[in-house]
Image: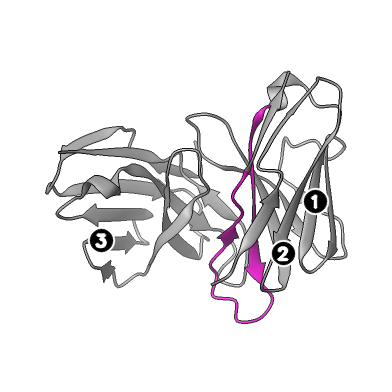
Amino acid sequence: GAVVSQHPSRVICKSGTSVKIECRSLDFQATTMFWYRQFPKQSLMLMATSNEGSKATYEQGVEKDKFLINHASLTLSTLTVTSAHPEDSSFYICSATRLAGNTGELFFGEGSRLTVL
Amino acid sequence: RKEVEQDPGPFNVPEGATVAFNCTYSNSASQSFFWYRQDCRKEPKLLMSVYSSGNEDGRFTAQLNRASQYISLLIRDSKLSDSATYLCVVNREGNQGGKLIFGQGTELSVKP
């Protein structure tokens, strides 16, 4: 089956630093990847849609200069949380759709848990 | 109003019980619908897609009412392993990719 891998799975950083999270589709090409954020006891909230070779589309209320997204290839998208603050502590999850044979199903990464001290 | 709203939980049921989850969505242009399951601190996993005609997968039955913009999930003969958070999910833009919008989830706890 399709596999999407995220790295790192867990990161702790100091306030003010930047953190990069990678999302890779391991056995398929992903035209589109999505980044979600989930706070404790809350549902996933879509942050942005990442398309290979073009700028990401951000949801309302998500700061594009704060959450930098790069989708340089059909198998890799990165999310960089710049100048992280404690309120950015959250569970970040990426997902991807296939390029070929798209059934509408999204394949999720394992998630990255960010803790900003 | 949230775009996708679910029953508030948690649901605490004994093994073998039947439990139903309800969900409504506000965007009438929504194209496709899903139930996902999320275990604690894990990524969500697709449980089943929801079709207008209703569909069943073993102990799980999903229903969609487009006129009422309502989705349901029925779990029969619940097992301890069914304990998880169930997420009602709507795809705004149809089956060819598109954005998944998640409900807040309903937590289910199945007790022995």
What's the amino acid at mark 1?
Thr
Location of residue A45 with respect to B95 vertically, above or below = above
Report crowding for label 2: few under 14, some 14 to 19, many 20 or more residues within 10 A (C-alpha).
many
Q: Position of residue A40 (x, y in %)?
A: 52, 29
The subunit carrying tag 1 is: A
Q: Which residue is at a point 77% across and 22% down the rendered structure image? A: A85
Q: Which quadrant of the view contains residue B107?
A: top left
State which tag comes first along the sequence, 1 or 2: 2
Which residue appears at 44% of the width and 38% of the height?
B40
Quadrant where the C terminus of chain A sits is: top right
The magenta segment: A89-111
Q: Is residue B17 left or right of residue A83?
A: left
User: Which of label 1 and label 2 is nearer to you?
Assistant: 1
Asked if labels 2 and 3 touch by Cβ distance under 8 angstroms, the answer is no
Task: Determine the secondary structure under disc 1.
Answer: strand
Instruction: Estimate how packed mark 1 is, as few (under 14), some (14 to 19) or many (20 or more) residues with alpha carbons within 10 Å.
Output: many
Quick check: is B86 in the magenta stretch? no
Q: Which residue is mark 1?
A: A78
Q: Marks 3 and 2, how far apart in space?
A: 30 Å
Between A51 and B43, the residue placed more toward the observer is B43
Q: Is residue A100 magenta?
A: yes
**Could you say whether the residue bearing mark 2 is in a helix, strand or loop?**
strand
- Given residues A106 and B31, the one toward you in this image is A106
Q: Tell me the number on the disc at residue A32.
A: 2
Q: CA distance from mark 1 to mark 3?
A: 36 Å
Question: In this figure, which residue is indicated by the disc labeled 3?
Answer: B60
> Do the residues under discs 1 and 2 have CB atoms within 8 angstroms?
no
x, y (%) of residue B79? 20, 50
Q: Classify B77 as above or below A39.
A: below
Query: Which chain does the residue under circle 3 lie in?
Result: B
